[in-house]
Amino acid sequence: MGERYLYQKCPFLKEVSQERREQFETYFRTAPDWLIDAFVVEKMKSVSFF
């Protein structure tokens, strides 16, 4: 899984801080493609809890 594919599936990474982006990249660096394909990104209000 390349970083380019990760950014295609998670475009919000372009908007977060470099530190957060690097943490995310490190965590999913060895993730299989099927896992990245299963991602569902939902936008929430900033005061929402989940």
Image (tube, rainbow, N blue to C red):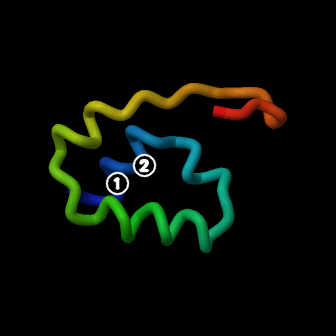
The picture places residue 36, in percent across and down from the top left corner, at 28, 42
Crowd rating for badge 1 (residues with CA inside 10 Å; few <14, some 14–19, many 20+)? few
Task: Describe residue 42's horizontal placement relative to residue 37 as left or right.
Answer: right
Q: Secondary structure at mark 2?
A: helix
Determine which of the numbered discs, if any, sits on residue 18 in the image. none
Residue drawn at (71%, 34%) of the image: 49
Image-quadrant location for residue 43: top right
Image-quadrant location for residue 31: bottom left
Q: Is residue 28 above or below residue 47?
A: below
Determine which of the numbered discs, if any, sits on residue 4 in the image. 1
Determine which of the numbered discs, if any, sits on residue 7 in the image. 2
Q: Nearer the viewer, residue 14 or 42?
A: 42
Kind of residue indicated by mark 1? Arg
Image-quadrant location for residue 45: top right
Residue drawn at (39%, 38%) of the image: 9
Q: Is residue 12 above or below residue 23?
A: above
